[in-house]
Image: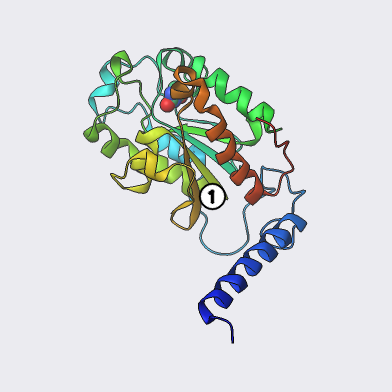
Amino acid sequence: MENPLHELGHLVRQLKEWLLFQGRLGWLGRPAHEPLAQAGAEAGGEEPPGLAEVRAELGDCRRCKLARTRTNLVFGEGAPRARLMFIGEGPGAEEDAQGLPFVGAAGQLLNKLLEKLGLKRNEVYIANVVKCRPPGNREPESDEITQCLPFLKKQIESIRPQVIVTLGRVASQALLGTQRPLTKLRGRWQRYQGILVMPTFHPSYLLRFPRERHKTWDDMQQVMEVLGKEVSREA
Ligand code: URA
C-alpha cells in the first residue's frame, strides 16, 4: 500500500485543482459574469448603516489632531455595493485639496492598475484608514488610527465587499489588527470579519520601486480569480 500521507497529499492537490476549476466555471462563489458592483442588499437580517449615515456620523470630525491641519476630510469614493474595496493609509496633499481618495501620483498608478485589470474606478470602493491628511505626509499615529478606524469598519459593514485589498503596511496592519510585517502578509489571503483580505504594496512604494510592481500584479490576479473576472495574465 502507498504511504497514506502521500495519498492524502495527492487527494488534497486534486481537490484544490477541482475547486479552482469549479471556481473558474462560476459554480462556486459568485458567478463569473457578475458585475463588480452588487445589485442590491441581500434580503433578511438587520440592514447595516448606509454610507450616508456613516458620513453623517463623522460630521465635521474633530476627534483627533489631524482635524487642525486638514483642508478637506476624505471619506471615500466608489460604488456603495462594490464587491472589491481598496484601503489606503491616509490622504496626501492632492487628496486633502480635492476631498477625494487616491487622486495624486499614487492614485494615478492605482488607476493604471485598475485599467489594466479591466476595472472601472467607479465599480470599486476606495477609502483610507485615516480620513484626514497627516501633515507632511507622515504616517498616521496610533491615536489617530484608533479614532478613525471605527468609521472605516462601518464603511466596510455598509458596503459588505467580497474582497478587500489593503494597500501597504499601515492599512494592512490597522485593518487586520496585527503587527506582522507586510513582507509576511503580502500576497497571502487574510480575513477581516469573514471578508477576504489581500494585503499588497502601497502604490507610493511601487512608484519608488517599479521593479516590485509585478508582485502587486500577482496579488491582484489572486483577487480577480476570486471575483471571477477574466483578466490578462501579462504584467
Ligand atoms: N495615499 C493613501 O494612502 N491614500 C490616498 O488617498 C492617497 C495616497
Residue at image x 55%, y 40%? 219
Disc 1 crowd, CA 10 A, few/some/many (<14, 14-19, 20+): many
Q: How is the image coloured?
A: rainbow
Q: Is residue 203 above or below residue 6?
A: above
Direction from residue 105 to residue 64 in the image, left or right: left
Mark 1 residue element: loop
Residue 7 picture quarter: bottom right
The residue where tag 1 is placed is: 160
Q: Position of residue 175 (x, y in %)?
A: 38, 44
Q: Position of residue 139 (x, y in %)?
A: 30, 25
Please identify the residue farthest to the front as the structure is shown.
1
Residue at image x 59%, y 64%? 44
The amino acid pointed to by label 1 is Arg
Residue 232 picture quarter: top right
Residue at image x 63%, y 61%? 43
Frontmost residue, 35 versus 11: 11
